[in-house]
């Protein structure tokens, strides 16, 4: 199927006839015990193999179908493992490539729970994390390597401040040194950034967001290149990772419409961000498709689209005024996560240790959903109208 275009693959991927029978969507197959006709049949089912029933934890057609569909979106993938959340996917991908005594280079703009996992759990295992500037070039990262560096983790763009990283150059440098590369690709999804083709070893998705797409499922995935597949699969299996077939069913259902949803998220977000850029209360739009976003030139070079999530730095004002602005929005829900069909707004408070994020004023992160952008703009206009006057601040 890898000769087909991505929009075709999201429709056809993982829909094997022997898993679906005559049905269009893969059914929810639930089991723990699998029964065999004989002891020899039972023995033949081991070691567990993708596509062969052995025991519930090793999956049924519902899980296999979703994993295969996700692999088909990353040409060259050796396989995909599913996890009960995006955070579990991040944790397990890291554990699959790191051992006590190793050092990890972690991007300073990473999702906060990813940082917490490194600072608490990896530390407990004797693995050291060194944070690096999201705008570091491959050469600057190379200068940070030590004989113990085993992995480089990227999140591009960062999900609060949206710096775009030079993923292909970093991966090429790491490959020469035998260092594994991991990318949280949740913002772009494989539809807008082909992580494995760009050299990434382990491509991570919080499928909770755009893949599931309806704000009602928690799920994660890691799609691996051949050189990291075996260890990802083995480690996940030893840690007993498993996702409910009900959740896989919902995520697979969401995946089939990912192309059209992302296209609309993209259009709506661009319309809203363009309007916001012209407002006096907004100092800067942090959206990878805008020149005001650090790493915009890399987005232009490497990505084939943008999605619905971006931030704005307000022009002066304080956190209380920012919180009041978010409270004043009517169409935007106030809540974490993103990637569903609905618009959301949250105060964004980036946690940094290796770099300092400088905004003219407080940040608000917006997820632009599938509502009519004119209504979203009207809602933002009303809320921004109440934002305190501020003198233009340097960007
Ligand atoms: C960029 C990014 N990665 C990973 C995650 C974690 O996903 P989950 O909430 O499914 O654990 C999130 C959640 O917000 C996220 O924004």
Image (spheres, grey):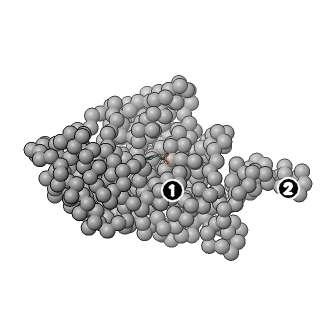
Q: Residue furthest left?
A: 391
Q: In front: 391, or 394?
A: 391
Corner quadrant of residue 247? bottom right
Where does residue 49 sit, x and y in percent of width and height?
72, 52
Which image quarter is the N terminus in?
Answer: bottom right
List x then y, in percent, for residue 150. Answer: 50, 34
Q: Please give the name of the residue rendered at 33% of the width and 56% of the height, measured from the top-left corner.
A: 332
Residue at image position (61%, 64%) is 14
- For residue 333, which numbered disc appears in the image? none
Q: According to the image, label 1 marks what residue?
A: 216
Residue 9 rendering spot, x and y as whole percentages: 52, 67
The response on whether ligand 1 sits within 8 Å of label 1 is: no
Which is nearer the eye, 209 or 192?
209
Q: In this orientation, does residue 225 appear?
A: no
Q: Earlier in the sequence, mark 1 or mark 2?
A: 2
Circle 2: element type:
loop
For residue 36, the mark is 2
């Amino acid at each position: 199927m890898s000769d087909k275009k991505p929009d075709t693959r999201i429709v056809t991927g993982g829909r094997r006839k022997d898993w679906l029978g005559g049905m269009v969507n893969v059914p929810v197959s639930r089991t723990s015990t699998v029964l065999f006709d004989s002891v020899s049949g039972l023995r033949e089912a081991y070691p567990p193999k993708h596509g062969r029933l052995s025991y519930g934890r090793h999956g049924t057609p519902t899980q296999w179908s979703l994993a295969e569909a996700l692999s088909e979106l990353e040409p060259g993938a050796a396989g995909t493992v599913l996890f009960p959340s995006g955070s579990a996917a991040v944790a397990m991908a890291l554990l699959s490539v790191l051992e006590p005594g190793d050092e990890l280079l972690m991007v300073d703009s990473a999702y906060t729970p990813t940082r917490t996992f490194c600072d608490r759990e990896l530390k407990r295992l004797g693995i050291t994390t060194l944070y690096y500037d999201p705008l570091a070039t491959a050469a600057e990262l190379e200068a940070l390597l030590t004989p113990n560096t085993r992995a480089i983790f990227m999140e591009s763009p960062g999900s609060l401040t949206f710096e775009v990283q030079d993923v292909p150059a970093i991966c090429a440098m790491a490959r020469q040194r035998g260092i594994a590369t991991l990318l949280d690709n949740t913002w772009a999804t494989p539809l807008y950034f082909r992580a494995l083709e760009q050299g990434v070893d382990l491509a991570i998705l919080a499928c909770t967001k755009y893949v599931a797409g309806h704000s009602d499922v928690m799920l994660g995935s890691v799609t691996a290149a051949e050189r990291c597949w075996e260890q990802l699969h083995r480690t996940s299996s030893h840690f007993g990772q498993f996702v409910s077939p009900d959740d896989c069913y919902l995520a697979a259902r969401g995946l089939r419409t990912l192309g059209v949803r992302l296209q609309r998220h993209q259009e709506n977000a661009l319309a809203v961000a363009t309007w916001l850029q012209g407002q006096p209360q907004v100092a800067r739009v942090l959206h990878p498709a805008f020149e005001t976003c650090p790493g915009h030139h890399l987005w232009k070079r490497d990505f084939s689209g943008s999605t619905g999530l971006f931030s704005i730095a307000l022009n002066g004002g304080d956190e209380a005024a920012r919180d009041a602005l978010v409270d004043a929005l009517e169409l935007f829900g106030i809540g974490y996560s993103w990637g569903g069909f609905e618009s959301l707004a949250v105060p964004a408070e980036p946690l940094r240790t290796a770099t300092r994020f400088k905004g003219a004023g407080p940040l608000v992160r917006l997820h632009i959903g599938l509502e009519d952008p004119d209504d979203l703009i009207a809602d933002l206009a009303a809320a921004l109208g109440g934002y305190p006057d501020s003198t233009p601040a340097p960007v």
